[in-house]
Amino acid sequence: MTTTSAPPAPAQPKRRLGDRLFAGSATGAGILILVVLAGVAIFLVTEAWPAITADSADLPDGKSLAAYIAPLLFGTLLAAVIALIVATPLGVAIALYVSYYAPKRLAATMGYVIDLLAAIPSVVYGFWGIAALAPAMVPFYGWAAEHLGWIPFFAGPASTTGKTMLTAGLVLAVMILPIISAISREVFGQAPALHREAALALGATRWEMIKMAVLPYGKSGVIAGAMLGLGRALGETLAVAIVLSASGGITFNLISSSNPSTIAANIALQFPESSGLAVNALIASGLALFVITLAVNMFARWIVTRRADFSGAN
Amino acid sequence: MAKRIDVSDLDIYYGNFKAVEGVNVSIEPRSITALIGPSGCGKSTFLRSLNRMHEVIPGARVEGKVVIDGQDLYGADVDPVDVRRQIGMVFQRPNPFPTMSIYDNVIAGVRLNGGKMRKGELDELVEKSLRGANLWTEVKDRLDRPGSGLSGGQQQRLCIARAIAVEPEVLLMDEPCSALDPISTLAIEDLMAELKERFTIVIVTHNMQQAARVSTSTGFFNLGGVGQPGHLVEFNPTEKIFSNPEEKATEDYISGRFG
């Protein structure tokens, strides 16, 4: 019988100092983001708790918390969805024009201009909305209430100041346009020449080539851009607070002067004058916004990974 | 469907740079024509000028004539999109559309041509094209899977199936085997011998054995020096090129004395 000797211990790979430092700092950064996120979540839950458990009579307006938050949540989603519906096709079209249609020098300039749009502070957008866009929209609102009144969105009576949900949504659309178009431009530019040439060699026109080889390839990027934009639209405070004439109440009427406020704008407007349980209620609405934003992002991820086989990444 | 190609006094430019100069050649229908020559000699550019794919690069233009069965490809009223619908192309690297299934890849060209076909006709066309590309038995159970999941050789045959599905008049192949292993290369070469019965095939290759194996005629391209245009040195039946070439430069190249 031969005794089997224990296999030699696997050689420990040499741990270099630089590797250890880098691995440590990268891990630390990763942990930090989780800690921050957890901290925010814990803060929101603990501060919102008194409002969640409170009797509805003690809450602002004497309504239950759900009844307090529901119109705000509705307003938030409505404004953001309007912004997304307007900005996504426009952003994708701009990105396609810049990457495949514009002459080279114009394309570069347009790229800069779009990036510049993203750098404008939201208070400026708010002023633009109230001073320029809202008055400009008033005639349209009057016309829409008269002729398109059978559509619930345009039921009227038309606002005479233009401070409507539609105006707020349009301001938000302009704000998120650069995000969507910048990210779309990035992914469209990366559509492989290999596949673009395959489409052209089959006799595709430029638009058909874009449909076959560019849009499918860039789809997940466009969705990611739209979700980033949606995140900004959901959380945008100042522009909405300035532009929207809010009086509460859930309505799909986009052009009247009584609109639901949004969570972020409501917090900004109410917080300075609130105390006690009212503050907790505001924070509870913030918690609702946090949860919605998280859900939107997870939904976007799910869309992106759903058909990973066909994503072109393999 | 196979057509004859006549090229006369063809010069190809990229902007001000003359890439290829003075090509005169007649390519017979139902034949395989191989184009050989050192890198940068313009053979790929010449190949691409046969379906106007070189125009993808801004500033590209040609002088001279390319006539396919009496039709001038560069006539004033000829749309390059139409040209490419009649002349199929297979590229160096297999490029099935990654966002499409195998089935959709095969009918991609047919969809572009606007042919409204019933499901049954499409199914038949897919099977016929995949059989034509010797790929049917390997993929018939996974037509709804992405084409990018296939091996390189299978992907290339899928691209050939996609190209022949529209029944082109001419099939251009730009180094179709250079990214493939010898077994897959053999499969493609066997396939080319079959496709020759139906199509006019022009192939660019760096593999001289391949040119000798598959082609009926061979053209040798060369360039005088760096920055000078490439030109067609010799165009002859493949047998003659590889046994008794007319030009000294051809003999030097195929016997490995340069390039």
Image: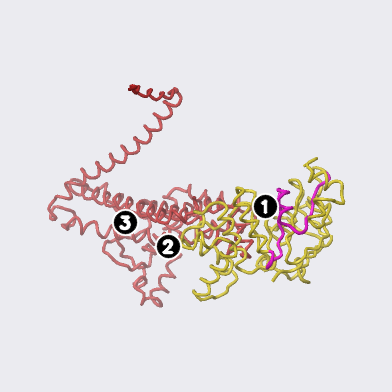
Chain colours: A red, B yellow
- Left or right of residue B122, residue B17 in this image: right
Q: How far apart are the alpha carbons under marks 1 and 3?
A: 60 Å
Residue A104 part of the magenta segment: no
Task: Name the image quarter holding the N terminus of chain B.
Answer: bottom right
Residue with the mark numbered 3: A262
Check residue A24 in the rendering and tell me which mark sits there, or answer none: none
Q: Amino acid at mark 1?
A: Glu
In what element is the residue under mark 1? loop
Q: Are marks 1 and 3 in contact (CB under 8 Å)?
A: no
Chain letter belonging to callout 1: B
Q: How far apart are the alpha carbons under marks 2 and 1?
A: 46 Å
Q: Quadrant of residue B235?
A: bottom right
Q: Nearer the viewer, residue A154 or B43?
A: B43
Residue with the mark numbered 1: B175
- Left or right of residue A120, residue A109 in this image: right
Chain letter belonging to callout 3: A
- Left or right of residue A47, residue B92 in this image: right
Q: Amino acid at mark 3?
A: Thr
Report crowding for label 1: few under 14, some 14 to 19, many 20 or more residues within 10 A (C-alpha): some
Q: Residue A196 placed where, x, y %?
A: 59, 57
Q: Amino acid at mark 2?
A: Ile
Residue drawn at (33%, 21%) of the image? A3
Residue with the mark numbered 2: A85
In what element is the residue under mark 3? loop
Looking at the rendering, the stretch of residues picked out in magenta corresponds to B196-224
Q: Residue B32 placed where, x, y %?
A: 73, 60
- Sequence-wise, the earlier of marks 2 and 3 is 2
Residue drawn at (65%, 49%) of the image? B178
Chain letter belonging to callout 2: A
